[in-house]
Amino acid sequence: MTAMAEKLARKVLRSFGYDIGKVGTARAAYDFEDEAREKISLVLDHTMLSYECLVTLYQQARHCETTGLPGSYVECGVWKGGAVALMALANLAHGAGRRHLHLFDAFDDICEPDPAIDGERAISEAEQWADVRREELSGKLAPLSGIYAHRGGPGSIDEVHALLCGTVGYDDEFVHYHKGWFQETLPALDKVPDISEIAILRLDADWYASTKICLERLYERVVPGGIVIIDDYGAYDGCRKAVDEFREARAIKALLNHVNADCRYWIKP
């Protein structure tokens, strides 16, 4: 590893609370971790994901590419595009051709949690970051103004496009933006081309209602061997409930793999 690459890798790890000294002499905790670190450094300012989530996501996308698993990469909850850009980087490094990327997001502040189902953490974060009282929350499809202010605001299509097609160099012909609430965009899915098969379905949908509709509308399109990632399973009660109900109703027995305190994934049989 060059001195510059080593310095960059240490900077990436420090940003996640890791300090392992000389990167080149450290024993990697993940397969292909040195490769993943290099890619992560390019998207770090565009994601809220932890290091564990990012390095695991790169592994998952790399696996899809090296095994030739068919299908698009679909993300529901994009923010500033760091996660989907990491998947795009895996495709550029290992794919035989470009995959279609489908990005579903309001590209605005997230909608309200439902206090009856989404849990205390969701309510507390809304109170803290959106300056709203819990008795005012009803789960309506309206932006929680200011919820992302402490993170630099919500992402925009222009910002995500600049990362994907500028910084990363992905062909914009294969990038598709679906702007709006999931409850509005997903019912029109049959009109969307190039999404009949999904290799990775990554859900960063936070709440019960949004997670539920994503699974109901998209899961059947995930190919056997495809990967379903639930970013907020351990974070919000509503998300966990939506996933547990869905898996039980469809008798899904695949192991719900643990990435970190919040994130889980399973591989579709």
Image (tube, grey):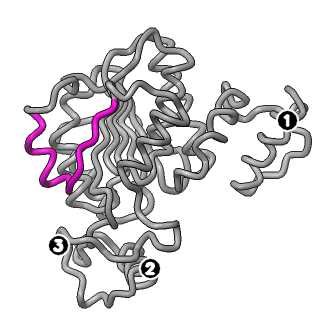
Q: Is residue 234 magenta?
A: no
Q: Amino acid at mark 2?
A: Trp
Q: Position of residue 88 (x, y in %)?
A: 47, 29
Residue 179 position (above or below residue 128)? above
The residue to which callout 2 is attached is 129
The foreground one among 225 and 245 is 225
Q: What residue is at 58 percent from the left and 43 percent from the top? A: 43
Disc 3 element: loop
Q: Amino acid at mark 3?
A: Lys
Q: Mark 2 and mark 1: span between their CA atoms?
A: 37 Å
Q: Mark 3 and mark 2: span between their CA atoms?
A: 17 Å
Q: Position of residue 81 (x, y in %)?
A: 45, 46
* Residue range corresponding to the magenta coloring: 175-190
Q: Quadrant of the C terminus?
A: top left
Residue 100 position (above or below residue 79)? above
The residue to which callout 1 is attached is 4
Disc 2 element: helix
Which mark identifies residue 63? Answer: none
Q: Quadrant of the N terminus?
A: top right
- Asked if residue 76 lies left or right of residue 140, the reply is right
Q: Earlier in the sequence, mark 3 or mark 1?
A: 1
- Asked if residue 221 lies left or right of residue 57, the reply is left
Q: Position of residue 29 (x, y in %)?
A: 72, 35
The foreground one among 9 and 237 is 9
